[in-house]
Amino acid sequence: MAFKTVLDGHELVIDVAPEAGGGDKGPRPKVLTLVSLAGCTGMDVISILGKMRVKVDRFRVATEARLADEHPKKFLEILVRYEFAGTGINPDSLRKAVSLSEEKYCGVRATLSPAVAIRHEIVLNDETVPG
């Protein structure tokens, strides 16, 4: 069940769990979709904040997905959680950067939506930023 691919000169193995007949030699394809979404929007947000001259000490993007119970077990909903740390950061700047990524720049999100409900949460210094 394992497949090897080369992406932009980088070798990657994808596989499935042993209980599904795989050898657990690499990540699952659906999880890579979530990684692609997190990477795409994360790069956008950091780039936008840089242009806004917002200094972030730490940044993390995490995703969670709810799958359909029946085959095909497609994504029904994805939560993108943006976690920021730093001093003097205006939450409005974070909201704007996330909004621009979601609405204008992130091609992965645009590909998934509206077929998949995608929502987000912004956390600044361990506190949820109200929408």
Image (spheres, rainbow, N blue to C red):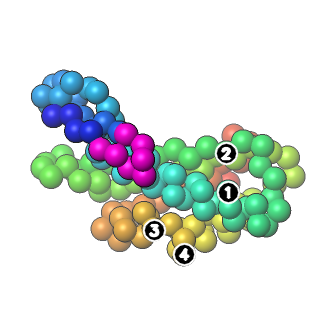
Q: Mark 1 points at which residue?
A: 46
Please name which of the two marks, 3 or 2, marks the residue nearer to the observer. Answer: 3
Q: Is residue 57 above or below residue 112?
A: above
Compute the Cα span from label 4 to label 1: 15 Å
Q: Is residue 105 visible?
A: yes
Label whose residue precedes the other's in the sequence (3 or 2): 2
Contact between labelled residues 2 and 1, with CB atoms less than 8 Å apart: yes
Label whose residue precedes the other's in the sequence (4 or 2): 2
Disc on res. 107: 3
Disc on res. 131: none
Q: Can residue 34 be seen in this view?
A: no
Compute the Cα span from label 3 to label 2: 21 Å
Residue type of the residue flagged with mark 4: Lys
Contact between labelled residues 2 and 3, with CB atoms less than 8 Å apart: no
Residue type of the residue flagged with mark 3: Gly
Q: Which residue is drawn at 60% across and 56% down?
A: 43
Structural crowding at the residue carrying mark 2, measured as other residues with C-alpha within 10 Å and reported as few (<14), some (14–19) or many (≥20) = some
Mark 1 secondary-structure assignment = helix
Q: Name the residue under label 2.
A: 59
- Dividing the picture into quarters, in which one does residue 127 lie? top right
Q: Mark 4 points at which residue?
A: 104
Q: Where is residue 76 in the image (x, y as percent from the top left)?
A: 29, 56
Front residue of this view, candidates 129 and 18: 18
Q: Main secondary structure of the magenta part?
A: strand
Q: In this view, does 97 lie above or below 76?
A: below
Mark 3 secondary-structure assignment = helix
The residue stretch that appears in magenta = 5-11
Label whose residue precedes the other's in the sequence (4 or 1): 1
Q: Position of residue 51 (x, y in %)?
A: 76, 67
Compute the Cα span from label 1 to label 2: 8 Å
Structural crowding at the residue carrying mark 4, measured as other residues with C-alpha within 10 Å and reported as few (<14), some (14–19) or many (≥20) = few
